[in-house]
Amino acid sequence: MSFESIGDRYAPDIREAVRDLCAQFPAEYHRKVDEHRGYPDDFVDALTKAGWMAALIPEVYGGSGLGLTEATVIMEEINRSGGNSGAMHGQMYNMNTLIRHGSEEQRLKYLPKIATGELRLQSMGVTEPTTGTDTTKIKTTAVRKGDHYVINGQKVWISRVLHSDLMILLARTTPLDQVKKKSEGMSIFLVDIKQATGNGMTVQPIPNMVNHETNELFFDNLEIPVENLIGEEGQGFKYILTGLNAERVLIAAECIGDSYWFIDKVTNYTKERIVFGRPIGQNQGVQFPIAETYIETEAANLMRFEACRLYDDGLPCGAQANMAKLLAAKASWEAANACIQFHGGFGFAAEYDVERKFRETRLYQVAPISTNLILSYVAEHVLGLPRSF
Ligand SMILES: Cc1cc2nc3c(=O)[nH]c(=O)nc-3n(C[C@H](O)[C@H](O)[C@H](O)COP(=O)(O)OP(=O)(O)OC[C@H]3O[C@@H](n4cnc5c(N)ncnc54)[C@H](O)[C@@H]3O)c2cc1C
């Protein structure tokens, strides 16, 4: 890196170790995976073997018991190295749901195997095609029949199903018109993906702009054993929501990693590219957008570490987690724009990696939560403005 950043002082040993591992997977590796629409198996294996994918699993279950601060540093470094955390970040989010709300029996059954990499918990099925962000209207149902639940319905954009062994699935267990609050009556289940595929669950991959393995899922009388219910029946939406603050902060860190990658790339390029007899980086019209995006990234990073601190101290952090995600996604998108702009035509050539990272970082404006929904959260929950939906 050609510049310092505020985050360098957080978890420096972990940062350095992850950075060293990532350095073994240079730009050419990620470019090839993208070109072939493949999956970075070797990279994910290396991260798993080094224990980084089990960072949040408590030591008693075989993990390293690290906090969210450290977990975000791992994700940041992956993106900062030129990789894409989208291939493997699901495990970091989903882990919390199982750790916090799973029974001791479930934790003992799954967590040690996830820690060694024998099992992957990379998928979470929430979004549906006809309800979108309005999650409480989901139509996928789970009906109890003896010692199992029967699932019917459809999900869309469910990522990493083809590279995961387990999925956390949200389904309605009590019809919407029979609950007091619309957020009640939904439950979460652990789905054994191999067992379910072809036995009530069909997976249909969705080709998309990013090399992101994501799918449409169809459920036709899929049977899930009762022991795979996580927590209490009817409380699933609440459980999903509690995991979202961690998700927001992890995503913020990924955006910040992207942003530093873009800034580093464009800074180096504009120092060397000679047009009109001097480096293009000597023009203030080129310098200012880059300087501005660096300032915005540093500011987003402060909010990200404040959210991490609150989360790791067990304090409420909804506002900070949401604001960090919005600021970081904005900063990475601005950095991406400056980077592609000042690479001129070369920004569009695959061999420079800029167009790939540009596509990857654009996703954060929409998924896992759109910018508008964050603004709506802050308007309602922080500023006390009237509820709009
Ligand atoms: C590559 C990819 C991977 C994904 N992976 C997963 C996954 O693994 N699991 C999963 O469950 N989901 C996943 N998603 C889904 C993702 O979380 C949703 O796409 C996202 O939450 C937006 O929902 P939607 O697409 O239904 O948009 P909609 O709800 O249809 O909204 C469309 C747009 O309208 C605007 N909007 C909607 N409502 C409002 C409002 N009230 N006020 C103001 N503006 C509004 C927003 O700008 C929003 O972007 C993934 C999506 C993508 C693209």
Image (cartoon, rainbow, N blue to C red):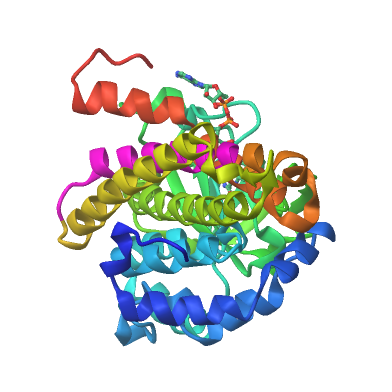
The number of discs equals 0
> Which residue occupies 38% across, 17% down?
389
Within the magenta stretch, is there residue 176?
A: no
Q: Out of 180 and 52, give the one closest to the viewer.
A: 52
Q: Quadrant of ligand 1?
A: top right
> Which residue occupies 41% across, 43% down?
328
> Which residue occupies 43% across, 52% down?
256
Q: x%, y% of residue 334?
A: 51, 36
> Which residue occupies 62% across, 81% down?
24
318 shown above or below 75: above
320 shown above or below 230: above
Q: x%, y% of residue 362?
A: 59, 39
Q: x%, y% of residue 312?
A: 21, 62
Q: Out of 262 and 289, give the one closest to the viewer.
A: 289
In magenta, the rendered stretch is 315-338
148 shown above or below 304: below
Magenta region, mostly helix, strand or loop?
helix
Give the side of residue 176 with respect to residue 30, left or right: left
